[in-house]
Image (cartoon, helix red, strand yellow):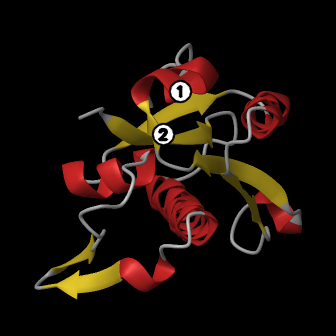
Amino acid sequence: MSVSKMMIVVRRDLKMRKGKIAAQAGHACVEAILMALKKEGRLNQVEFAGDYIDLKVPENAEKTALTEWFAQGVAKVCVYVDSEEALLDIQKKALEKGILCALICDAGVTEFHGEPTYTCLALEPLYNDDANEITGDLPLY
């Protein structure tokens, strides 16, 4: 079994409140997971399993970073960058490798003086080595 994780990259230079960071990261995670489930044709495999959501993968189905991520406890790791340029660079690196990423642009209603602002992004669940190629040099948030 290979270990997989979801990487969340947050802009630290915006000095967002903790609640704002949590909300923005939440938006990114939800969007990235929905994108990954759709890409793999697995939206119909999502099931409620008691108090949590599970991915019911047929036994003969190919294992992927996404299926392993659900099986291993949905690990998420937050790292940071200090500029919009650095955030967009991470997005570009991911897209060049065919990796899905959810880039979040806040509308600016409660912060950022009414200006739409890129706040964070989340990568689809990836095996550790693949995630580290894109975000391995970024510091933990």
User: What residue is disc 1 on?
Assistant: 130
Q: Quadrant of residue 81?
A: top right
Q: Quadrant of residue 80?
A: top right
31 shown above or below 9:
below
Q: Number of numbered discs present?
A: 2
Mark 2 belongs to which amino acid?
A: Leu
On the image, the x and y values in percent for residue 85 come to 85, 31
Q: Is residue 62 left or right of residue 71?
A: right
Looking at the image, which residue is at 52% across and 54% down?
A: 21
Q: Quadrant of the C terminus?
A: top left
On the image, the x and y values in percent for residue 35 come to 62, 66
Query: What is the residue that sits farthest to the top in this orientation?
Result: 137
Mark 1 belongs to which amino acid?
A: Asp
On the image, the x and y values in percent for residue 24 come to 58, 60
Looking at the image, which residue is at 57% across and 61% down?
A: 36
CB under 8 Å between discs 1 and 2: yes
Looking at the image, which residue is at 30% across and 33% down?
A: 3
User: What residue is disc 2 on?
Assistant: 126
Q: CA distance from mark 1 to mark 2?
A: 6 Å
- How many other residues sit within 10 Å of disc 2, few (<14), some (14-19) or many (≥20)? many
115 shown above or below 126:
below
Which structural element holds mark 2? strand
